[in-house]
């Protein structure tokens, strides 16, 4: 049976150095419930240590947490990677950490706490998460797909750290599953702004770094289950699955 799932697929936690300290697992889930979100993607910069804790905080609720990450490629392009399970995410985490060098400077970039579902700080990530990996755009998208994930070009309507801002175009041989824009742009306007990208699926998400921004950008997927496979069908408009932005009517 196909039903509607309201999704915000790009949410940070306090683990991201630029994420607010109030973005701890329990608070994120509470806000998602009040925003009536069904599916969320947890995507910290180059790291994933809080994902399992957010999944635990969501236990007993109807919210599906997709394990994810926002990867910075060597071209300084942000890519959202989303998976069905922690096993696939762990493989991508290894791929990222193998080429992410340097240590965080809390005084400059902010702290990177790992917080469990009981609001306890259980550690700190000491790596330079704000940095770029040594992985190319092509390599990264290929690796995400190799692990059955969804590869989304992040915030293409922003100058900084977007594929359009960094390269000026999307290399035609790199098959993103979707291109993300913010709620300020919205999907309808994005289609007007980027007619050359008409073949791509545009999605909208919040890229929330602060609790009040969670759910500010969302898409409604019409699909059987909240899985990556079903999302790929919906993004392609296949087998009766489809999706809509908040500025589009069904
Ligand atoms: Zn980003
Ligand atoms: Zn982000």
Image (cartoon, rainbow, N blue to C red):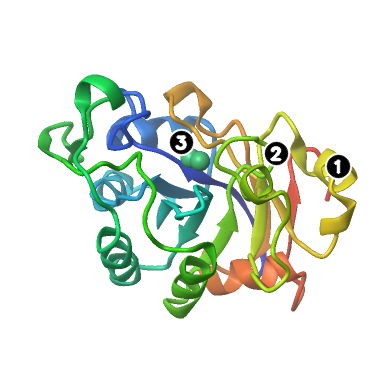
Quadrant of the snapshot with the N terminus: bottom right
- What residue would you read off at disc 3? 33
Separation (CA) of disc 3 from disc 2: 28 Å
Foreground pick, 10 / 55: 10
Separation (CA) of disc 1 from disc 3: 33 Å
Q: Position of residue 212 (x, y in %)?
A: 49, 22
Secondary structure of residue under mark 3: helix
Who comes first in sequence, dot 1 or dot 3? Answer: 3
Q: Position of residue 37 (x, y in %)?
A: 53, 42
Foreground pick, 24 / 1: 24
Q: Residues within 10 Å of mark 2 (few under 14, many from 20)?
A: many
Please report the residue visible at 64 percent of the width from the left and 70 percent of the height from the top: 174
Please report the residue visible at 35 percent of the width from the left and 24 percent of the height from the top: 20
Secondary structure of residue under mark 2: loop
User: Residue 233: which quarter of the image?
Assistant: bottom right
Q: Is residue 156 left or right of residue 191?
A: left
Q: Is residue 227 visible?
A: no
- Between disc 3 and disc 2, the foreground one is 2
Q: Are marks 1 and 2 in contact (CB under 8 Å)?
A: yes
Who comes first in sequence, dot 1 or dot 2? Answer: 2
- What residue would you read off at disc 2? 157
Q: Position of residue 225 (x, y in %)?
A: 55, 67
Residue lying at the far left in this picture: please name it: 122
| Residue 240 disc label | none
- What residue would you read off at disc 1? 193
Q: Is residue 152 visible?
A: yes
Q: Residues within 10 Å of mark 1 (few under 14, many from 20)?
A: few
Foreground pick, 104 / 189: 104
């Amino acid at each position: 049976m196909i039903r509607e799932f309201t999704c915000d697929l790009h949410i940070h936690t306090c683990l991201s150095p630029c994420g607010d300290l109030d973005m701890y697992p329990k608070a994120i889930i509470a806000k998602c419930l009040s925003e009536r979100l069904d599916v969320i993607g947890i995507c910290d910069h180059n790291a994933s240590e809080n994902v399992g804790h957010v999944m635990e905080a969501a236990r007993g609720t109807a919210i599906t947490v997709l394990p994810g990450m926002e990867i910075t490629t060597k071209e300084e392009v942000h890519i959202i990677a989303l998976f069905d399970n922690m096993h696939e995410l762990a493989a991508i985490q290894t791929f990222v950490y193998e080429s992410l060098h340097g240590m965080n400077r809390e005084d400059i970039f902010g702290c990177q706490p790992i917080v469990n579902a009981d609001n306890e700080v259980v550690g700190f990530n000491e790596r330079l998460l704000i940095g770029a990996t040594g992985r190319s755009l092509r390599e990264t998208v290929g690796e995400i797909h190799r692990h059955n994930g969804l590869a989304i070009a992040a915030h293409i309507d922003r100058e900084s750290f977007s594929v359009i801002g960094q390269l000026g175009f999307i290399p035609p041989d790199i098959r993103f599953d979707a291109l993300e824009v913010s709620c300020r742009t919205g999907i309808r306007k994005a289609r007007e702004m980027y007619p050359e990208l008409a073949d791509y699926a545009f999605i909208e998400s919040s890229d929330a770094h602060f609790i009040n921004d969670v759910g500010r950008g969302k898409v409604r997927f019409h699909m059987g289950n909240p899985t990556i496979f079903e999302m790929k069908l919906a993004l392609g408009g296949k087998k009766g699955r489809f999706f809509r932005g908040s500025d589009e009517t069904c």
